[in-house]
Amino acid sequence: MQPTPRPTHLTAGPRALWWMGVFAACTTAGCQREALRGEGPVWTDTAEAFEGVALEVAVVDGRGDPLPDAWVSVQEQGRDGQADGAGLVTVDRLRTGPATVVVGLSGYEPVERLIDLGPEGAAAAVQLFPIEPDATLSVTVTDAYGEPLLNAPVLLDGQTIGLTNAEGLLRVDVVEPGTYELRVDAPVGTTWHAWRSPALQIVPEGFAEVDVQLGGQPPATAYYTGTEPCSICHAGAYERWEGSVHAQASRTPDEMVGDPTGIDDDFTGGTVISLGPAVPGAQVELLTQGGSWKVEITDAFGVSTGRLDVMEIYGGHSHGAAVSVMTGPVRSLVPAAWAAASEGSAPGKPGKGWVAAWTDGWFDEQGNLALDIVGRPGLEANFDLNCAGCHATGHAMTNTFNPALEAEGLGSELERVVGCEACHGPGSAHRIAPSSTRRASILQPGRLTGAEQVDVCARCHERVEPDDHPFAIPPAWPMDADGIFPRPGTELYAVATPDPSWWLDYEASRIVGDQAGEHKQGPHHRGPNGYDGACTDCHLVHSTSLRTDLYDNGLCLGCHSTRFPTNSSQASHAGHATFLPGELTPGACVSCHMARSAIVVRPDVLSGAGEARMHQMWPQPPEASLAEFDAAGVTQLPLGQAPISACLDCHRQADATFGCLCPNGDPTQRHVHENMQLSWDKLFGEVP
């Protein structure tokens, strides 16, 4: 059944008070009332007749269906009328001026409304609602300044149920309680950003009250102006952003001098990187020539690209870094990547260094360089098609000067950082707007629901396949049919389809960059008790760093302290000794709930785990790893080819560090994961 709306500009008072008002009006007007079997008043006018004006009223129910036999009375003037089969009522011979009009029908709550009768009379539409609704929803809508919004459309499950009144209020009776998607659109003629709540719970005989504040968004004509102008008015946010990974999403060689990664030393010192076993015999040489960084790629047969100019370095903060070079007219990813040191303290952890990566597009199956006539590798290595949308602001594949280059993947962007406008939208209109409308001209993600905030981040942090662009190599950044990166606040799935690369029986990504996709599978996304988590619940808004140290349980206990108020309750939840053999300690929540999963450029050589932590938040049992062995039909897989459970990473470190006698061993062997699952079952009561 569909929801039944009740506009709140029609106020229904208690029935006893209403009848008292009718009686008083009857006495004052010198008229008499006769009961019509409980259907409402019938008026007999004793005053002298005059022409006057007419009031026309259409009376309908919550679905908009006419209500025959409904009655309308103009109280001060002692005039009334009854609806015909189409729910239409005409009351004539009325004096002009304000009039109190009451509309009613047996079984429905009466409605009182003040109507101004002009020289031409007046017309109105009135909805009546059952006296005893199953459940009620009240929605109050304001703009970014806190002012009520008139005529804001309110929708349940995509169906418009009414418009807000002058107080920004809409009240509806919901015939069938349940779970609805609530959406509030901007009133016609305004540019406020629509608001939606994907899982609104309405219980039987309940009363749900929702306060909605619509934020702004840039107009369609707005364009990108760069991050620097934002610092004039938002100095504090700009300063925090300057130290973030977003501000360093792309860096030039000059900006890398003295960087903690030491990448500049690798170029100035000359480093040769073997691409085996991916491409046996091939290599990449890093060098400096004439003060500029160069890269030379040589295939297995000694054929070289020559020295290519390095354009930018991407990443290098926590996991790894990529390098782009100019190959003919386009930027291409170098088939080698810098990897950060592996996490953990056990012996055997690899340090930072260069490894083979992204070799697709550079070589054929025999190990020959596979370049076209102007020196370009295949589109798999094309930086603009695969990466640039998320490592820049205002990126677009369309090249108006030479449309043919669009097919080759040549793009352009305003600035090669993830700047303010990457999350807030193009700021040209915001810069020139007067203070009275400035908030309406820019997107403020903090005014969106949790799910909508996640979608702002998901444009770069969810693995998707572009739907429409003919030259996209999926998965890639979510470009539309014109090769333009979607603005923040727009529907991500309008231009792209989720394309996760998950482990077979393990809802976590094999490849870094799908944090939002993982989050959407977990309890923090549209979760129980109405919680709809946003990325900024854990990450600081502008600096992008965590609100506290990753291993500080306070990050999780900020929300979960009621369930785990003490160290002992936290330790009991883990169910076994952690870190120190024989001692029950709380341990870190993230060790089990955010196991390392996605691989950026290399797996951990000790545990086989990846560099990026899983954001789904469900602890994955060891048996989830077995699916990969079974799918391959083998009992041994190469390192990094099986997912690491919430147990194995720590247990392998414990064995190497403390000589722990735990059921661990080689993560490439199937029986190791079987043994870990047996311990899991015993620990959590699955088996004796």
Image (cartoon, helix red, strand yellow):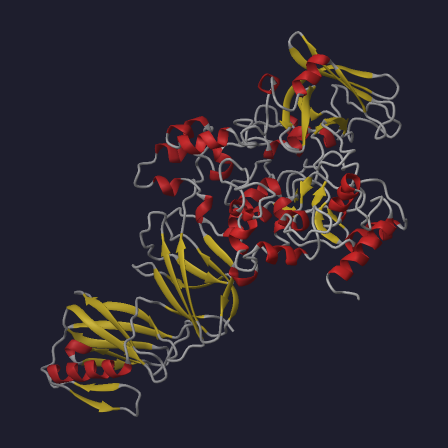
Q: x and y percent of residue 660 in the render?
A: 79, 46
Q: Identify whether 132 is placed above or below 188.
A: below
Q: Is residue 302 left or right of residue 422?
A: right
Answer with left or right where residue 207 lies relative to residue 321. Answer: left
Outermost residue toward the front? 582
What percent of the width, then of the height, locates residue 316? 64, 28
Q: Residue at x 78, y 26 (%)?
A: 362
Image coords of residue 370 (percent x, y): 81, 24
Q: Is residue 179 above or below residue 339?
A: below
For this orientation, the residue located farthest to the top is: 290
Above or below, 29 relative to 117:
below
Compared across the picture, whether 362 is left or right of 78 comes to: right
On screen, residue 494 versus residue 29, left or right, reads: right
The answer to whether residue 76 is visible is: yes
Residue 231 position by quadrant:
top left
* Residue in the image at 15% along x and 77% along y: 77
Q: Nearer the viewer, residue 293 or 492?
A: 293
Residue 252 picture location, percent across and down: 60, 20
Residue farthest to the left, as pictured: 48
The C terminus - image quarter: bottom right
User: How many numbered circles are shown?
Assistant: 0
Q: Quadrant of residue 399?
A: top right
